Image (tube, grey):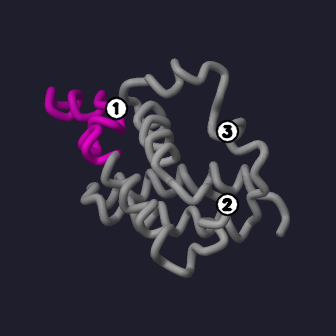
Amino acid sequence: MTAATTDQDSRSLYEAIGGQETVRKIVTHFYDLMDSDPRYAELRALHAPDLTKTRESLEGYLTGWFGGPRHWFEQNPGRCIMSVHSGVRITKTTAQQWVEAMSTAVRQSGIEPGLGVRLSVSMARVASAMARDD
């Protein structure tokens, strides 16, 4: 194993995808899709009309979840994605809409395709765990 391989393998996902700039792109693409594409209307209906705070929160959450600075977790002790959404009725349909929109946003952000697939698979697992029967 070469030093370059070791260095690459030791990078966090956050570093591997390009850091904060890429996380911001993912979040921007995701909410822009959710706001403009009628395929995500049910998902959009679960959110407040103004998405400003929601965008900021998701960006902070994903930053920490991907291995970057954990400010969101420090500011929200004991909270996780499940607890944040505990009062929201997430159906299998809206969970699938979230996965599709997020996967598209990941692809649009310029992430290396293999890493994009890795992210999408992880996000699909989370969404599936949050979904309840339609």
Residue 105 picture location, percent across and down: 39, 62
Query: Between tags 1 and 2, which lies in front?
Result: 2
| Residue at figure coordinates x 61%, y 74% from the top left | 41
Question: Is 30 on the left or on the right of 4, as rendered?
Answer: right
C-alpha span from label 1 to label 2: 32 Å
Q: Which residue occupies 49% across, 28% down?
A: 72
Label 1: which residue?
12
Instruction: Tell which circle, 3 or 1, labels the residue nearer the N-terminal end.
Output: 1
Where is mark 3, residue-wise? Answer: 84
Within 10 angstroms of label 2, few (less than 14), some, or many (20 or more) residues?
A: few
Between residue 9 and residue 77, name the one nearer to us: 77
Q: CA distance from mark 2 to mark 3?
A: 13 Å
If you read the primary sequence from the N terminus, does the residue marked by circle 2 or circle 3 appear first? Answer: 2
- Mostly what secondary structure, the magenta segment? helix
Q: Which residue is mark 2?
A: 46
- Amino acid carrying label 1: it is Ser
Q: Residues at badges 2 and 3 in contact (C-beta under 8 Å)?
A: no
Q: Is residue 103 magenta?
A: no
Q: Is residue 15 magenta?
A: yes
Q: Residue 79's x, y, as percent? A: 65, 28
Q: Quadrant of residue 116?
A: bottom left
Q: Secondary structure at mark 3?
A: helix
Q: Nearer the viewer, residue 42 or 121?
A: 42
Distance in Å between CA atoms under marks 3 and 1: 24 Å
Which labelled disc corresponds to residue 83?
Answer: none
Q: Amino acid at mark 3?
A: Val
Task: Tell me where residue 109 sits by quadrant.
Answer: bottom left
Callout 1 touching callout 2 (CB < 8 Å): no
Mark 2 vs mark 3: give the one in front: 2
Q: How many marks?
A: 3
Q: Residue furthest right?
A: 133
